[in-house]
Image: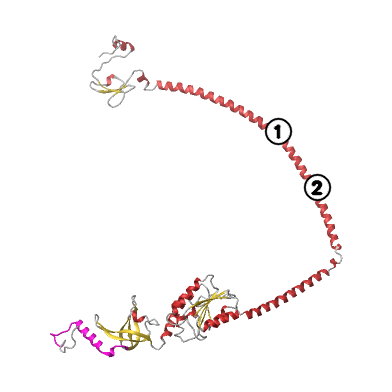
Amino acid sequence: MWPVHEPDLGRSAEGALTVTALNRLVKAHLAREAMFRDVWVRGEISNFKHHPRGHMYFSLKDETSRLQAVMFASANRALRFRPEDGLRVIARGDVDVFERDGVYQLYVKEMQPDGIGNLYLAFEQLKEKLRREGLFDRKRPIPRFPERVAVITSTSGAAIRDILTTLGRRFPAANVVIIPAQVQGLEAPASLVAALDRLRALVPPPDVAIVARGGGSIEELWAFNDEAVARAIFASPVPIISGVGHETDTTIADFVADLRAPTPTGAAERAVPDRRELRKLLAELRRRMEGRLVDRVRRGRERLQAVLDRAIWQAPERLIRPHEERLDRATERLVGAMERTLERRRARLEAVRGRLGDVRRLEAEVVRARRRFDEVRRRLGRAMLEALRRHRIVLAQWAARLEAAGPLAPLRRGYALVEGPDGRLVKRAASLAPGEGLRLRFEDGVAIVTVWDIREEAWSWETRSERRPADGRRKG
């Protein structure tokens, strides 16, 4: 750092300061001045940014000026409200220079809303946030006759005594499960969340649960305005009745709970029915049921007497006689109908028997026709075999004739076919010329020959024998 005691530093061109040196001089000057430490500043937040590392960067402004401000994570953890653009606040901090940019800014250590309570603002902000998420909309019904009731509260306060007294007086048949929790202080939110977690693990689960504490200041009741407590109440598998503070006290837990009671005693009254009222109700139901039974018996006796007073019961045989006559006539008609039906069935049976004889004769005709058919089929088979044999003989004869007339037959008898250079058959010697190449095709192959001489002579069996040597071999 440049020495700040040199009076001529920066007073001439030869002693000109660098930008860094000047920023350091200003920073050192501000550090020496007590008036720039722990200064309170009132203004409106703008350009608010919450860095992922936890630091908060924003500006404080009024009608004519703007001041850059920083609140590090170590300081803003204690905030009970959420800073945002447009919110007027009062901030306490140190004024210092950020050397790199050459700007001075307020390093905030403490901040509170301007014109509204810190706790109230935090309450309203959390309330609005949870309302938008729908945590206030679900309201489950409270069982009318719960068998198990869980109570989450401090075991040392007056609230637990009031709750147990009320439950025992109103509905002693209910089994009460107490889950201790701190309801005041910095550790109270975590203790309440742990108690609600234990509530979810109870086996068998209770039918309803009470979360309560006695009255107190807003600071003493603040644990029930904690976001984690509100979400734990919402996650409870059983309905929750809140009874926090007095009737005029309202907490976030009251909005999230399925039912709000004004006091811990009121929560116990809403959790179970009153046995005295149940007794009255049972007595009233018994009175109504007895009255209805008496009235029903009376009406039944009147109807029975009316039936017994009818003339038919004075002489019941007069009711039976017409029915006996109708029964006799119906019996006669039934017997007649059965006899007629039997006669028709007998007639159809005789007709079927007659047709059955015709069927037997037809079966005999079918047997005879089948025999004739089998005989004709055997004869036809023998005739077809004989005709096939004769046709095969004729076919063999024609095949022999065809083979004898074919071009290959002379080759088998020792003759040869003479083919010219172009592959055509040579039929006359006159068509040849000396030196011309020929092909002699025999039955078993082809011979290539050359014409040496051409002689004209007629061929016959005599000339063939004259040319044959005495030993039967051909001339050379």
Residue 40 at x, y percent in the picture: 33, 89
Q: Earlier in the sequence, mark 1 or mark 2?
A: 2
**In this view, 371 is above or below 225:** above
- What residue do we see at 75% from left, 41% from top? 349
The quadrant holding residue 72 is bottom left
Residue 402 part of the magenta-drawn span: no
Side (left or right) of 432 relative to 170:
left
Whether residue 235 is visible here, answered yes or no, is no
Residue 317: image tag? none
**Helix or strand or loop: what does disc 2 sit on?**
helix
**Helix or strand or loop: what does disc 1 sit on?**
helix
Q: Which residue is mark 2?
A: 339
- What residue do we see at 54% from left, 26% from top? 384
Inspect the image, locate mark 1, and give the three-letter code of the amino acid beneath it.
Arg
Q: Nearer the viewer, residue 460 or 121?
A: 121
Inspect the image, locate mark 2, and give the three-letter code of the amino acid beneath it.
Glu
Q: Which residues are magenta?
A: 11-39
- What residue do we see at 75% from left, 42% from top? 348
Q: Which residue is mark 1?
A: 361
- What residue do we see at 70% from left, 36% from top? 359
Residue neighbourhood size for the residue with mark 2, other residues' Cα within 10 Å, grouped as few (<14), some (14–19), many (≥20): few
The quadrant holding residue 88 is bottom left
Residue 274 at x, y percent in the picture: 61, 80
Q: Distance between the Cα atoms at labels 1 and 2?
A: 34 Å
Side (left or right) of 395 relative to 426:
right
**In this view, 352 is above or below 132:** above
